[in-house]
């Protein structure tokens, strides 16, 4: 199944700290997030919630409003959990649904999407596909050293969707958050993001870069047309050569016998393109790395190794670095979140405290 209506809108790169949100605080976060969502849906419709959540900086500001510091541990998992719990029971009235979560809960995403099927005006299988491909791309298509452990899928009754998922780097103890928005027409496997924001950059096997287009075509062709036995022999031959090391594509990590077993199954399926290959069961990071090696070293078609992360500035810097402040975007972020807070059915003390946190997050001066 092919889907050409996805764009990843951003990635956040954050330090991980130990600690857990107290129950009393999470209950208040749930109530506040519920009121914010209700106000946004009433004012702009459920699709606006997807657009806001898919903006990594607005998401971070929401976390601050709910009670987090900008770098607090658990922003992603707790904010998503509070949103999911906050709208529980009113999804049908809102036309907004949230599936998935952290760890084992993330693997329940497909079944939770299908459970909402009777309330949807769209095919649930298309949403399940979008959820699965977003995870596949950020696991195998972009191999940047972060292992996914959190996946939240937000969708409307009409079939619009967004994804917030997060991976952790065990070495650096940093987390990277990936945001997807399904309404923009784009390709799952070619530049699916419009901004990836990070405090640090490294080397990545980036098969979703536009520069990797020839490599994607070559990899799909190799997987579908070359005999698996031949590919296994090529991998064994490559392992015997003295070749340069790459951070995300190490020969020592490739086991030709195991990869060959996967390639036998792939060859029988005859994937039509790289997206089709990536979506096949059993095709994971190691298979993609092995095929990338063959593409580069045997066929002379290298993939991109550029980490797509950029600076983590929400609206530019006051001194013009790394770029001037985007006043229109800045004002829009303030307007949506502040208006939602004002309209929320909260007590005055809670409302004033939330607005104060919004100011403290640097999003509001008034």
Image (cartoon, rainbow, N blue to C red):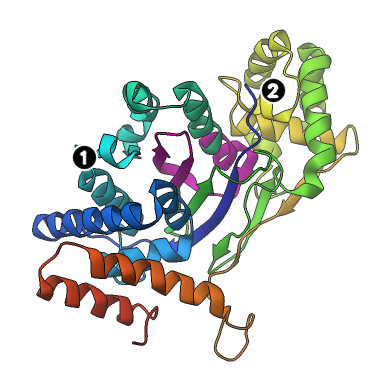
Does 245 lie within the magenta span?
Answer: no
Answer above or below: position of 2 versus 154: above
Does 145 lie within the magenta span?
Answer: yes
Question: Where residue 72 appears, x then y in whole percent?
Answer: 31, 66
Answer above or below: position of 305 versus 152: below
* Horizontal arrangement in the rendering, residue 59 relative to residue 8 (left or right): left
Q: Give the range drawn in magenta.
A: 135-164
Residues marked 1 and 2 touching at CB (< 8 Å): no
**Residue named by callout 2:** 256
Residue 243 sits in quarter:
top right
Q: Nearer the viewer, residue 316 or 250?
A: 316
Q: Which residue shows up at 56% across the image and 32% down it?
A: 133
Q: Which residue shows up at 62% across the image and 38% down it?
A: 5
Residue 269 sits in quarter:
top right
**Residue named by callout 1:** 88
Q: Nearer the viewer, mark 1 or mark 2?
A: 1
Residue 240 sits in quarter:
top right
């Amino acid at each position: 199944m092919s889907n050409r209506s996805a764009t990843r809108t951003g990635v956040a790169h954050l330090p991980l700290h130990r600690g857990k949100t107290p129950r009393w605080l999470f209950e208040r976060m749930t109530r506040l997030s519920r009121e914010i969502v209700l106000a946004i849906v009433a004012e702009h419709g459920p699709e606006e919630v997807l657009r806001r959540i898919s903006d990594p900086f607005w998401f971070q500001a929401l976390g601050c409003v709910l009670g987090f510091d900008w770098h607090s541990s658990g922003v992603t998992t707790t904010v998503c959990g509070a949103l999911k719990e906050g709208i529980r029971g009113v999804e049908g009235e809102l036309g907004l649904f949230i599936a998935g979560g952290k760890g084992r809960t993330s693997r329940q995403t497909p079944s939770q999407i299908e459970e909402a099927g009777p309330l949807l005006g769209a095919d649930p299988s298309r949403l399940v596909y979008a959820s699965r491909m977003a995870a596949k791309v950020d696991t195998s298509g972009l191999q940047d050293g972060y292992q996914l452990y959190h996946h939240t899928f937000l969708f409307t009754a009409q079939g619009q969707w967004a994804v917030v998922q997060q991976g952790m780097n065990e070495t650096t103890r940093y987390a990277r958050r990936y945001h997807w928005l399904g309404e923009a027409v784009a390709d799952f496997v070619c530049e699916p993001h419009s901004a990836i924001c990070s405090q640090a950059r490294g080397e990545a096997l980036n098969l979703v870069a536009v520069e990797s287009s020839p490599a994607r075509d070559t990899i799909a062709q190799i997987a579908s047309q070359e005999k698996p036995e031949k590919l296994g022999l090529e991998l064994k031959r490559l392992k015997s050569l003295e070749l340069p090391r790459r951070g995300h594509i190490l020969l020592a990590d490739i086991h030709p016998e195991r990869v060959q077993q996967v390639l036998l199954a792939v060859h029988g399926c005859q994937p039509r393109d790289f997206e089709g290959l990536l979506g096949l069961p059993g095709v994971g990071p190691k298979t993609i790395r092995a095929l990338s090696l063959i593409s580069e070293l045997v066929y002379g078609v290298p993939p991109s190794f550029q980490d797509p992360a950029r600076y983590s500035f929400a609206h530019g810097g006051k001194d013009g670095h790394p770029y001037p402040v985007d006043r229109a975007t800045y004002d829009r972020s303030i307007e949506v979140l502040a208006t939602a807070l004002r309209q929320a059915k909260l007590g005055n003390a809670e409302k004033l405290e939330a607005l104060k946190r919004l100011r403290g997050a640097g999003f509001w001066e008034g």
